[in-house]
Image: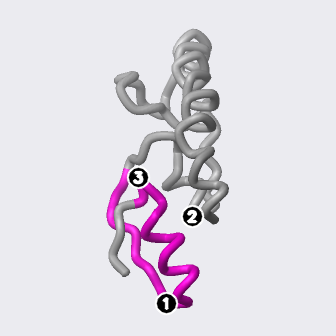
């Protein structure tokens, strides 16, 4: 199953049918691409989207990057909560 990871219905369907799936996307909201590949993505080093930062940040830029990442934790939990019941 070729699927878009933004909405996890494709992965859930493939899992229930016991068939492989391929995710087609990069730079997903909520860091799902990092979570799916189990790659570390610390905000102290990895710049968040739309911040215009690079991996060479001073202290204040790292703070900005961290603050920019905080809403993701709350927003992503509420958006993907209904799909946890399906999985």
In the rendered image, the quadrant that contains the C terminus is bottom right
**Is the C-beta separation of discs 3 and 1 under 8 Å?**
no
Residue that numbered label 3 is attached to: 6
Q: Earlier in the sequence, mark 2 or mark 3?
A: 3
**Is the C-beta separation of discs 2 and 3 under 8 Å?**
no
Task: Give the label on residue 37, or none.
Answer: 2
Give the crowd class for mark 1: few <14, some 14-19, many >=20 residues within 10 Å.
few
Q: Residue 71 appears at what percent x and percent y? A: 57, 22
The outermost residue toward the top is: 60
> Residue at 56% across / 90% down in the picture?
18
What span is colored magenta in the figure?
Answer: 5-26
Task: Give the label on residue 2, or none.
Answer: none
Q: Earlier in the sequence, mark 1 or mark 2?
A: 1
Q: Is residue 25 magenta?
A: yes
> Residue at 52% across / 51% down in the picture?
32
As drawn, 7 above or below 29: below
């Amino acid at each position: 199953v070729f699927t878009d990871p933004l909405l996890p219905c494709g992965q859930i369907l493939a899992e229930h049918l016991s068939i492989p799936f391929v995710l087609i996307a990069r730079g997903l909201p909520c860091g799902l691409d990092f979570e799916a590949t189990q790659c570390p993505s610390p905000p102290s080093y990895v710049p968040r989207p739309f911040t215009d930062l690079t991996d060479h940040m001073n202290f204040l830029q790292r703070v900005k990057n961290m603050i920019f990442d905080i809403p993701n934790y709350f927003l992503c939990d509420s958006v993907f909560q209904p799909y946890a019941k399906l999985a």
